[in-house]
Image (spheres, rainbow, N blue to C red):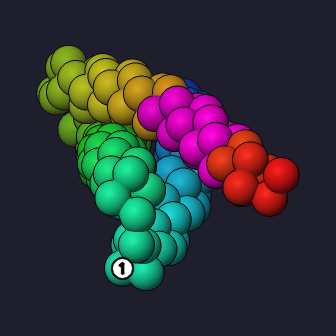
Amino acid sequence: MIANAGSHYPMLTAMLAPALLMAATGSLLISANNRLARVVDRLRALLAARGECGSAELRSALDRQIAQHRRRSHYVLRACVLLYVALGAFVATSLTLAIDAYTGFALSQVPAGFALFGVASLLVASLAMGLEVHLAVNGLTAEIELSMKRQAERDADGS
């Protein structure tokens, strides 16, 4: 049990770190979910363009872009799941800190374990988002090259 009325301040102070990590994780989740929505929108546009495509070469290029966007969506989805796991771990950290203080610190390393698990989840989610960004830039480069090639072909046909 908590010994005196003033002893709850250290517990509340200890609970601030997980709260800050929860806020940061929430911001990352918003960003990741927005990226996922953009990838899904782009995939839908590519699928529509593929359905209207007549050229085998263009269809092949679109197929490569579709495959790349599918990989991007999997990286973002993985990151979202890991960010939700991290958020849950930080909530568990905060709760176990309060329970630990209330029970006279009987939980030992449980709060730290949840915190470490949450931070590890953040790390892996960050790596997944980094891979997704890398694919996004590669995809943009491929789209630019395809667009320039198509423009050059149109210019050559018009000359």
Q: Is residue 38 above or below residue 100?
A: below
Residue 106 place in picture, x, y as percent:
16, 27
Mark 1 is surrounded, within 10 Å at the Cα level, by few (under 14), some (14 to 19) or many (20 or more) other residues, namely: few
Quadrant, the N terminus: top left
Element under disc 1: helix
Residue at figure coordinates x 54%, y 37% from the top left: 142
Q: Is residue 5 above or below residue 40?
A: above
Residue 88 place in picture, x, y as percent:
31, 50
Residue 141 part of the magenta-drawn span = yes
Residue at figure coordinates x 54%, y 55% from the top left: 35
Q: Residue furthest right?
A: 159
Give the quadrant of residue 158.
bottom right
Q: Amino acid at mark 1?
A: Gly
* Residue named by callout 1: 51
For the record, the magenta segment spans 135-151
Task: Inspect this view and state whether residue 26 appears.
Answer: no
Residue 134 place in picture, x, y as percent:
50, 27
Q: For this rendering, which residue is in front, 143 or 156?
A: 156
Residue at figure coordinates x 62%, y 36% from the top left: 145
